[in-house]
Image (cartoon, helix red, strand yellow):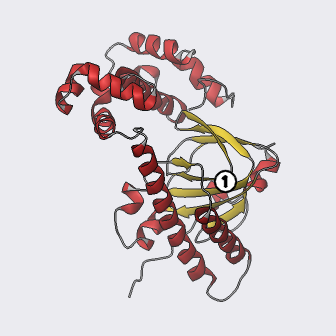
Amino acid sequence: MNTSPLLLVPFREVRHDQPDDCLHYESVAVRGTEMDWTIPAHRHEGLHQFQWLEQGHVRGSIDGREFEAQAPVLLMLAPGSVHGFTYTPDTIGHQVTVPTTTLRQLLGGSTLADAELGASCVLPDIEGEGEAECRNLFAQVAREFRTQSPGRVHALLACATLLAVQFLRRRGEHFTRERAQGARDTLLRRYLALVEQHYREHRPLSFYAEALGVTPDHLSRTCRQATKQSALQIVHERLLLEARRLLAYSPMPVTEVAQQLGYDDAAYFSKFFSRSVGNTPSEYRALVASGVRGEGVSP
């Protein structure tokens, strides 16, 4: 018999003054109307958040990458992911927040929560049967959450399991379509994995190409075809993402941020950051602290 304690969604993360619960549901309009439909950049630790937009339009950034999407669209925000959105006032949608550890338990101790749900994702073009399934599932969560019917917690946790599985399936279908279009080329995926391991080491492009068994030209050409960025730009973008995170969400001095990113010369790091973002590291940190958002300012 499983005697693991029930994990609760901490109110300080998502719930105003309501008591903690096994998960949290609310319509997008709750925060939308309170905040003039613009949610500033923020993040949640130890929580997965699923959003389903039935109507309207959303634009925003997730971990420094901007996007726009028209409903119907499914979004999943992984723990620690920095995200901010602006919705059109006609938006109709739902969001469900679940503790990540609860998801791990619900998925039977498998690696799905960390491996398959470990990165935030936007899934547009959910149509037909998939749209009906998402609409019905989120509606069921809303009904169960608002009532105190017998077995409420068990029903909500069962819905959370179905929600995670539904997302996994839609995400797989989405990536399959992208692979067919060449946007998720195997070489690109292998390159991104290598970049994640070595981006702080400032390796030359020849290092990555040799490790992947291709020429630097072929690697960069593949990256441009799939992402419209060169292989070197992808490395720089990963460095900038980490720099924005450290500057916005840690008290590290700029010199220490530079060291964390593999720069021996803090002045060289500042020059690279300023040229890419349009603000010095100190200016960027001050802008984020004051809540100013704009091009190149979202963390």
Examine the rendered structure and indicate whether residue 206 appears above or below residue 160: above
Residue at image location 57% in from the left, 74% down from the top:
159
Image coordinates for residue 229, horizontal then vertical, percent: 43, 24
User: Within the image, what quadrant is residue 243 found in?
Assistant: top left
Give the quarter of the figure containing the C terminus. Answer: top right
Image coordinates for residue 268, horizontal then vertical, percent: 39, 11
Residue at image location 58% in from the left, 22% down from the top:
284
Q: Is residue 153 visible?
A: yes
**For the residue labelled by badge 1, is the local secondary structure a helix, a strand or a loop?**
loop
Q: Is residue 260 visible?
A: no
Examine the rendered structure and indicate whether residue 40 appears above or below residue 30: above
Image coordinates for residue 239, horizontal then vertical, percent: 40, 26
* Label 1 environment density (alpha carbons within 10 Å; few <14, some 14–19, many ≥20): many
Residue nearer the viewer, 152 or 89: 89
Residue nearer the viewer, 221 or 23: 221
User: Within the image, what quadrant is residue 149 found in?
Assistant: bottom right
Q: Which residue is mark 1?
A: 72
Residue at image location 56% in from the left, 82% down from the top:
154
Left or right side of 31 for 115: left
Give the quarter of the figure containing the N terminus. Answer: bottom left
Residue nearer the viewer, 55 or 271: 55
Image coordinates for residue 100, horizontal then vertical, percent: 47, 61
User: Within the image, what quadrant is residue 141 found in?
Assistant: bottom right
Left or right side of 27 for 283: left
